[in-house]
Image: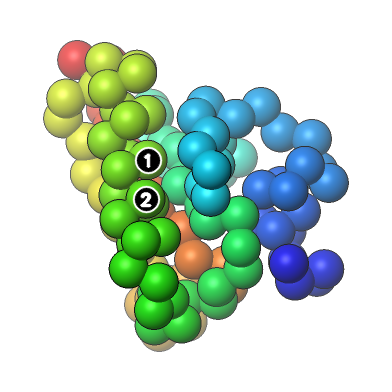
Amino acid sequence: MNEDCIFCKIANGIIPTKFVYESANTVVFNDINPKAPMHMLVVPKKHYATLNDLDDKELMSELLQSVKEVTKKLNISDYKTLINTGKGAGQEVFHLHIHILADKKS
């Protein structure tokens, strides 16, 4: 855990947040600055600054499985996923995360 990272604090319960979904190594919560009617973030519990820093294939799979599980749980069939990797690509919080954006529940 990176003690200066807000997503580490959220993912590890230091900052109380209601999780939409949780797996062994990931959490999903609503974005506080949504860009769509439904905007959630899938975050690994362990700190990785960007996708380029993640070499764990099992965790990569679990991140995508978390996307599928939370969208299934919320009955969302149409959605967009986005991973910003690096400042030049628009990454603002340097803890790997996947955005799930949807217009509405399907």
Q: Residue at x 39, y 79 (%)?
A: 55
| Quadrant of the drawing holding the C terminus | top left
Q: Indicate whether 17 appears above or below 77.
A: below
In which quadrant of the rendered view does residue 8 lie?
bottom right
| Quadrant of the drawing holding the N terminus | bottom right
Comparing 85 with 90, the one in front is 85
Q: How crowded is mark 2: few (under 14 residues within 10 Å), some or many (20 or more)?
A: some
The amino acid at mark 2 is Glu
The residue that disc 2 covers is 62
Q: Where is residue 103 in the image (x, y as percent from the top left)?
A: 26, 27
Q: Position of residue 71 (x, y in %)?
A: 30, 28
Q: Indicate whether 90 appears above or below 19.
A: below
The amino acid at mark 1 is Ser
Asked if residue 36 can be seen in this view, the reply is yes
Give the structural element (helix, strand or loop) at label 1: helix
The residue that disc 1 covers is 66
Comparing 25 with 4, the one in front is 25
Asked if residue 28 can be seen in this view, the reply is no
Count of all numbered marks drawn on residues in the image: 2
Asked if the residue at tag 1 contacts the one at tag 2, i.e. Cβ–Cβ closer than 8 Å, the answer is: yes
Q: Indicate whether 41 appears above or below 6.
A: above
